[in-house]
Image: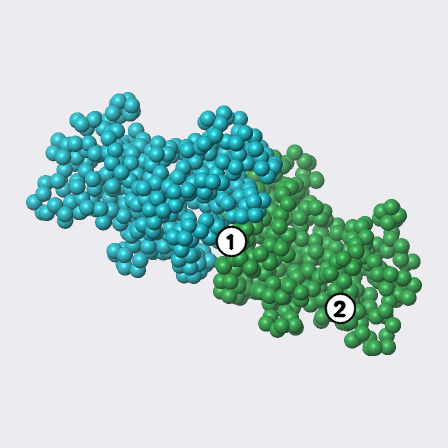
Chain colours: A cyan, B green
C-alpha cells in the first residue's frame, strides 16, 4: 500500500442504553441497545493509516501521544482481528497480513469533556484499517465492538440497533441500521457539557459491578429493554417525536437507577445534570407537549433531542436558564442559528452562571467516511502540527 | 375523663423501605417494611389530650398552630376510627364516644429539618387517645397507619416489621415487633441533617407516581423486598451487623433507584447525600469491615447505623470530613460522648464547611409511653409557653 488512508467516524448517543456484558472478553452485551449517529461535521475522530513493507513497527498515535499496543488489550485485539480478516479475504499467500501499520488518530472535540470518545475512536480505527486494506465491511461492527462495545454502532449512520444476540461466539451480536439519517432530517441534538471535576467509576467497571450486584438489572434486561426497543424502533419508523422522547428519557433514568442500585452505588449524574432534567420536564410542561428529551451516559453531560422547528425558541430559553460569562460565540457551538433576540417565552428563572462549559448543537450523520486531509505524510511521518510532540 | 393524658412517641427509621400503596384510602402498602424505633429521649412527638362533656369542640394544636380537622382527611379519619373503637370496646350506651377532644402536640425536633415527623405524630395521637379512653392496644397500629402509613411502626419499640398483607380491608396489614430495643443495646443511630432548600415531591405523591410509572418497582415488590425482609430479620435476630448494614444500604439505594425510575423522576438525594454515601463506603473500606451503614428516606438527610464500640472513632473522622464553623456543643447533639482528641485515624480529606446543619446521635427506644409533663392545663387551656400563639 504505502499510501495514507484517512477516515472520520462519528460519535453515537444511545437512547436505549447498553449496560452489562454477557461476555467480558468478546464484549457481548446483555441487552439490545439503540442509538443515533451524530454528524461528523461537528464531532468526529479522524484516523490516518499507513501500512506496507517500509513501515518497521506497529504504532498508534492518539491526540499526539504514542499508545502502548502491548499494554492495551483491546487495541491489540483489533489489530489481530483485522490481520485475521486480511488472511481470510486476501488469501494465505498475501503478504499484507505481515505489514506493519502506523496509525495516527485525533478527536476534534475535547476528550476531557467526558464525551464518549472510545466509540468514535474504535469505529474509526476499524473503518480506516478496512479501507486501507480493501476489506469488505460486513465484519466491521463486530471487530469495532471488541475495541469498545458501543463502537459497533458508530459504523452506521442514522438510527442504529446493536442486537445482543444469544450465540456464545457473538456471531449474532452486531449493529444494524434502523433508518438512515435522511429519514428524520429535522432531528437535532444539543450537547450540554457540564462543569465537573469528580472522578467517576469507568463504564467498564461500573457495568461489571452492576451485573454482579444489581437485582433490578435482571428485570431491566429481561422485561423492560425488549419492550422499549420494539417501541422506540416503531416511534423512529413513525417519526413520532413524543413517543421517541418519552422512551428516551425513561431509559436514561432507568439506566441511572440501575447504577444507583449497584453496590456500592455508581453515581454519574450531578446536581447540574438533575437541574437539566428538571428544566426539560418543566419546559415540556410549559409548552403542553413533549418538545425536548434528555439522555445521559456514564457522566454528567446531557444530550438533548429536539426537532428543528422547536430549536431556536428552546435555545433562547436554555441560554437564559443556564447563563454564562462567555461570549455566545464560544458558549454556543456547532450548527446554532441566531437566537431570537432576548425572548424568554416561558420566563424560567436563571440559574447561577457557568454551570455549563459549552453547548454544542448538531444533527444526525451518515456514518464514517474517507477524507483527503491526512494526519500522516506519505513517508509515514506525522504532519507538522503534532510532529513537535513526537520529537519530545 | 376531664383529665389531661400525655404521651410521647418515637421516630422510626426504615431499613427496608415502604414505597407504594395497594390501597390509597386505607393506606395499605405494596410491600413489607422493617424499621428501627428510636429513643424518645432524643427525638419525640409529645401529645396531650383532654376530652369530656366540658370540652365543646374537637380541636388539634400542632407546634402551637391550630389545624383544621375538616380539611385534613387523615386526621379526621383517626378521630372517627378511635370513636368507633370506643363504641365497640365501651358499648353502645357509653357517652364517651360523643365527647369532644382537645389535642395539643409538639415535636422536640425541628420539623423544618425534613425528618419525617408524621410517623411519630400519628403514632402519638393514636396512642394518647387510646390511653385517654382506656382502649386496648391491638388495633392501634392499623389506626395509626391510616393517619400516616409508617406511623404504625412507631407504636412499638426496637425492631418492627409492617406486613403488607393481602386482605382488601387491610386486617392483615399491621406492625409487629421483631425484637425489643434491649436485644441489640449497642446499636447507635447518627442523623446527619443536611443543609438543603430544594422543594421535593411529597412522599405521598412520589410513591403514587412510582406505582404508576416505574417498571422496576414491580420487580422490587415481587422479588427483592420479600427476600431482603427475610434476610434482614435473620441478621437482626443474629445481631449480624455486617449483614444488617449491607442489606440496609442496598435497600436505601434501591428505593432511590425506584424514585429515579419514576417518570418524571423523583430525586431526594442531593450532592451532600452522595458525599455521605461515598464517605461511608470509603470508611468501611479503610477499616476492612462494614462498620457503618446509611439509609435515606424521601429527603437528603442521612441516618447512619453503627455499634457503640465503633462510635467515637467514627465520629472523630466524621466531624473532620464534615467540618463546621459552629461550636461542637451545637453541632453535635444527643448522646455524644467526648470525641477522641484530634484523631483522624484514616486521614480523609475535609470537605467544605457546613454541608451539615447538625449531627444527632441516638439509640434504640422502647416505643411510646405516658408522661407527666403535660402541654394542656386541666381546664383544657394550653400551657403558657404556647398560649400566646393561641391568643393571637
> Are discs 1 and 2 both within one chain?
yes
Position of residue A186 relative to residue B40, above or below, is above
- Counting from the top left corner in percent of width and height, residue A113 is at 42, 35
Q: Residue at x 63, y 43 (%)?
A: B198
The quadrant where residue A144 appears: top left
The answer to whether residue A112 is left or right of residue A347 is: left
Position of residue B320 relative to residue B256, above or below, is above
Would you say the residues marked 1 and 2 are in contact, meaning their CB atoms lie under 8 Å apart? no
The answer to whether residue A104 is left or right of residue A206 is: left
Q: Secondary structure at mark 1?
A: helix
Q: Secondary structure at mark 2?
A: helix
Along the viewing direction, whichever of B160 and B87 lies nearer the viewer: B87
- Label 2 marks a residue whose chain is B
Dot 2 crowding, Cα within 10 Å, few <14, some 14–19, many 20+: some
The quadrant where residue B34 appears: bottom right
Q: Which residue is mark 1?
A: B261
Mark on residue B55? Answer: none
Which residue lies most toward the front here?
A309
Work out whether residue B123 can be spotted: no
**Residue at mark 1 to residue at mark 2: CA–CA distance:** 36 Å
- Closest to the camera, between mark 1 and mark 2, is 1
Q: Residue at x 18, y 27 (%)?
A: A378
- Label 1 marks a residue whose chain is B
- Counting from the top left corner in percent of width and height, residue B153 is at 66, 62
- Counting from the top left corner in percent of width and height, residue B194 is at 62, 43
Q: Which of disc 2 and disc 1 is earlier in sequence?
A: 2
Q: Residue at x 52, y 38 (%)?
A: A314
Please state the total of marks drawn on the protein image. Answer: 2
Work out whether residue A315 can be spotted: yes
Along the viewing direction, whichever of A335 and B297 lies nearer the viewer: A335
Q: Which residue is mark 2?
A: B81
Identify the image quadrant of the N terminus of chain B: bottom right
Amino acid at each position: 500500500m504505502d499510501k495514507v488512508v484517512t477516515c472520520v467516524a462519528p460519535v453515537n448517543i444511545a437512547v436505549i442504553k447498553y449496560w452489562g456484558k454477557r461476555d467480558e472478553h468478546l464484549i457481548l452485551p446483555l441487552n439490545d441497545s439503540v442509538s443515533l449517529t451524530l454528524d461528523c461535521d461537528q464531532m468526529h475522530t479522524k484516523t490516518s493509516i499507513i501500512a506496507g513493507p517500509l513501515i518497521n513497527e506497529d504504532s498508534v498515535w492518539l491526540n499526539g501521544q504514542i499508545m502502548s499496543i502491548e499494554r492495551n488489550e483491546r487495541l491489540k485485539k483489533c489489530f489481530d482481528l483485522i490481520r485475521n480478516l486480511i488472511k481470510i479475504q486476501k488469501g494465505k499467500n498475501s503478504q499484507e497480513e505481515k505489514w506493519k501499520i502506523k496509525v495516527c488518530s485525533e478527536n476534534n472535540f475535547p476528550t476531557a469533556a467526558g464525551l464518549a470518545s472510545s466509540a468514535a475512536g474504535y469505529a474509526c480505527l476499524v473503518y480506516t484499517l478496512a479501507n486501507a486494506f480493501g476489506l469488505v465491511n460486513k465484519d466491521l461492527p463486530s471487530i469495532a465492538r471488541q475495541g469498545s462495545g458501543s463502537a459497533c454502532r458508530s459504523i452506521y449512520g442514522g438510527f442504529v440497533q446493536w442486537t445482543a444476540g444469544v450465540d456464545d461466539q457473538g456471531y449474532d451480536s452486531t449493529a444494524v441500521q434502523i433508518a438512515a439519517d435522511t429519514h428524520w432530517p429535522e432531528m437535532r441534538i444539543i450537547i450540554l457539557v457540564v462543569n465537573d471535576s469528580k472522578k467517576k467509576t469507568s463504564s467498564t467497571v461500573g457495568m461489571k459491578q452492576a451485573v454482579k450486584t444489581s437485582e433490578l438489572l435482571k428485570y431491566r434486561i429481561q422485561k423492560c429493554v425488549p419492550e422499549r426497543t420494539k417501541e422506540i424502533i416503531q416511534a423512529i419508523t413513525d417519526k413520532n417525536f413524543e413517543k421517541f422522547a418519552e422512551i428516551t428519557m425513561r431509559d436514561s433514568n432507568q439506566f441511572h437507577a440501575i447504577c444507583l442500585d449497584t453496590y456500592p452505588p455508581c453515581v454519574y449524574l450531578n446536581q447540574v445534570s438533575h437541574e437539566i432534567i428538571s428544566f426539560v420536564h418543566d419546559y415540556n410542561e410549559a409548552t403542553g407537549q413533549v418538545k425536548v428529551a434528555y439522555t445521559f451516559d456514564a457522566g454528567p453531560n446531557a444530550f438533548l433531542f429536539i426537532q428543528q422547528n422547536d430549536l431556536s425558541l428552546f435555545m433562547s430559553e436554555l441560554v437564559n436558564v443556564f447563563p454564562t460569562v462567555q461570549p455566545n460565540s464560544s458558549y454556543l457551538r456547532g450548527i446554532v442559528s441566531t437566537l431570537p433576540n432576548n425572548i424568554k417565552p416561558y420566563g424560567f428563572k436563571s440559574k447561577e452562571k457557568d454551570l455549563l462549559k459549552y453547548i454544542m448543537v448538531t444533527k444526525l450523520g451518515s456514518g464514517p467516511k474517507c477524507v483527503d486531509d491526512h494526519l500522516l505524510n506519505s513517508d509515514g511521518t506525522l504532519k507538522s502540527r503534532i510532529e513537535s510532540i513526537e520529537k519530545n
